Amino acid sequence: MPKIKTVHNIKQGHPLRYLHFADICIDTHNQLLYRQGETINLAPKVYDLLVYFCQHTHRVISKDELMEQVWTGTLVTENAISRTIVKVRKALADDPKNPQFIITVPRKGYRMVAEFVAVETVSNQKTSDCESQESQSQWVKKSRPTDVQLNGITPSNQTKSNLSKNTFWVIAGLMIIIVLTFVFSTKSNKVLQTKQVKALTREVGIELYPALSPDLTQLAYSKEVTGKPSYINIENLSNHVKRSISHSRAALSKPVWSPSEDKLAFLYQHNSVCMIYWAQLDNIKDKESWQAITECSADSSPHFVFSPDGQFLYFNDRQSASHGYQIFRVNLTNSEKDIVNQPITNGLGNYSFDISADGKSLVMVNSEFSPTTRIYTLNIEESKLKQTAKLDYLMRAVLWHHDNETIIHPSPHPAYELWQSNLDGTKLAVVASNTSRVKHLSRLNNGKDFSFVSYLLNRDIHFESRGQENIELDNSTVMDYLPALAHNSGQYAFVSKRSTSAEVYLSDLLDASTIENTKQFTSFNNPVKLYDLAFSPNDSQLMILADNQIYIANTNSMEVHKLPLDNIAIVGVSWQDENNLLLSSVRNADWYLMRYNINEQKLSPLPVGYQGGVYSAVDNSYYLIADDSFQVMKFSDLSVLPQVIPLTCQPSIINRKLNLKVTSDGLVCQSNAEDNQYKRYSFTTKSSRLWQKSVPSIDFDIKKRGMVYTITKQSVSDIMQTISL
């Protein structure tokens, strides 16, 4: 059975524009449904499911088939399918008690009984939208001058000339209308000129999450200093007097001003506790005065914002690291919490959002498992959701512009600019250009400006041999990171932003000081964020983990190709042998460990209940990390019960990298996230002990030659503000 044509494939390769039946018309290019004069913007999965039904009319379709064909690469519950079918029926105005389109076949599935026809144009339609498409097509045909006879008379040269002149003036008139439309639409969008910026902080340490008070007199921000939990500073911008709000155990961050500016909300995180509090400014240093607004998941880092009228706090949260973000709101008067109408929350879910300055709309960005972004808007009063764009890169954050019509967001990774764009994703202007990267955007309450964090990270790569000799490797003045050692060849690979974008480089340990010895391995055409590198057992291949994508590079030919793993979560990748990878994924918010055969392009499941794992050729065994306990289990054979070994690795995944490494004589992993404690398990003694290596983060690799790791040389993060001239 052929796979369903996805939205992407229909746009790229489907030769027919419409699917129609009676007065129902589906525009397959724009994912719109026209019904009795109403235009309905279909959510992605609603659209996919509806198109699949239309392509398979009069046939019973089981829920298992829908899971396989419509939700390809993910597992969903029957409840999720039922909810989506309810939305399809709502779009069709189909009464489930007296269905005209989709019939439920008890214990078997569903059947579409209406015969939808695929055509290029639609005629005899009652809906004005379909008629306009057909009329436009017919007008183009009729307005083309020809030599055919009219009423039995061959047109004279003068008649032909008049037709040509008329055609010319019609085309000229259309061009004028298009130009005027563009000019006026551009004016209505209030396209911004590139602004100058000024620094609001220039301190030692790292300043994050800026929030200017509504009257622009005070700046609140998070402060990070090595060796203590993050805390919040509130600075008077006229005299630069600061007040600090801290907690001896918990990290405080993400301050947000209430519209009345007499209160400040902030995030509280400690171990498994996550809370959003707020407090009166006059008494904010007194912890007893803090009031809880809502709790959040320990695996969440929620974004939150007040409604302009101060009645609600909107925030996003996820149940666990394997769930996507969902957006909620809390009524600050009675503490009631409800969920916001939003798209399906697989993958990242709705990870960034903002409420417009007029309080009427939410804009949210959504991503599942591929490096794409969908932009949605929500009419708050009507709770009406609309998809406005699908972009081929991951937009990291979003803000409403002051005009309530366009959006402000970082440029594609690595972001050095702030962009203004239409809701369809079309770039309108560069708001601010920066020598350092930008993040943590906020809108100032002056109708024109924005604040953001300007940050610079510079890491260098070092190699420590078995004899404890420390060598500084080929480093640039920018980020060099994700080092990976070859097993036998004496090469190492790493990622660098020396060419602005993140690219993979290959070098030789024996001559690492020579710049010419370093070769650029990749040239990505799209903005790509990279998470891990790993050499295959015989060093002939290099695995490159990007945003839910895996690239395989041949270390001899320098050829790079992407594996056909689409729209699935991919983390914790490791090699089993030259042709097989182990990887972890998320399906229906549960962890799944799988093997991928590169030659056969086939995924197969490994034992259930494990978040990640490695294969050791030393003893021909699998070592897998258990879901809940983070206990490492040894499988000499996957068909028999495993053996417990004295090693726990917590968490199992750190920034998409597996927190477990195989060495020539054992295993190494971070065993305690709180104090960055590492342990080593010996294959010989069958015991574990503290690993004495000084490793600042998971950004290291270890082989029989020694260890390669990164050292942070510079870490700067300042708060900037745009200036309107």
Image (spheres, grey):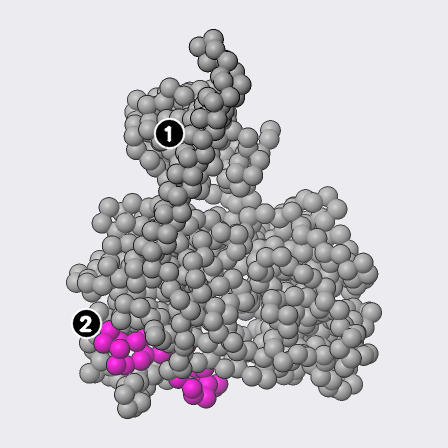
Label 1 sits on residue = 132
Residue 578 position (above or below residue 32): below
**In the drawing, does residue 557 fall left or right of residue 641?**
right
**In the drawing, does residue 397 fall left or right of residue 630?**
left
Please state, as top left, top right, bottom left or bottom right, where the N terminus lies in the image. top right
Between residue 530 and residue 63, name the one nearer to us: 530
* Marking on residue 495: none
Q: Which residue sits furthest left?
A: 333
The picture quadrant where one finds residue 128 is top left
Label 2 sits on residue = 260
What residue is at 82 percent from the left and 78 percent from the top?
Answer: 510
Binning the other alpha carbons within 10 Å of mark 2 as few (below 14), some (14 to 19) or many (20 upward) gives few
**In the drawing, does residue 338 fall left or right of residue 533?**
left
Residue 2 position (above or below residue 371): above
- For residue 9: magenta? no
What residue is at 59 percent from the left and 47 percent from the top?
Answer: 566
Mark 1 and mark 2 in contact? Answer it, CB < 8 Å: no
Foreground tag (1 vs 2): 1
**In the drawing, does residue 165 fall left or right of residue 475?**
left
Between residue 117 and residue 135, name the one nearer to us: 135
The picture quadrant where one finds residue 34 is top left
SS for dot 1: helix
What's the magenta region? 201-228
Q: Amino acid at mark 2?
A: Ser
The x, y position of residue 211, in whole percent, is: 32, 74
Please state, as top left, top right, bottom left or bottom right, where the C terminus lies in the image. bottom left
Q: CA distance from mark 1 to mark 2?
A: 49 Å
Q: Amino acid at mark 1?
A: Ser
SS for dot 2: loop
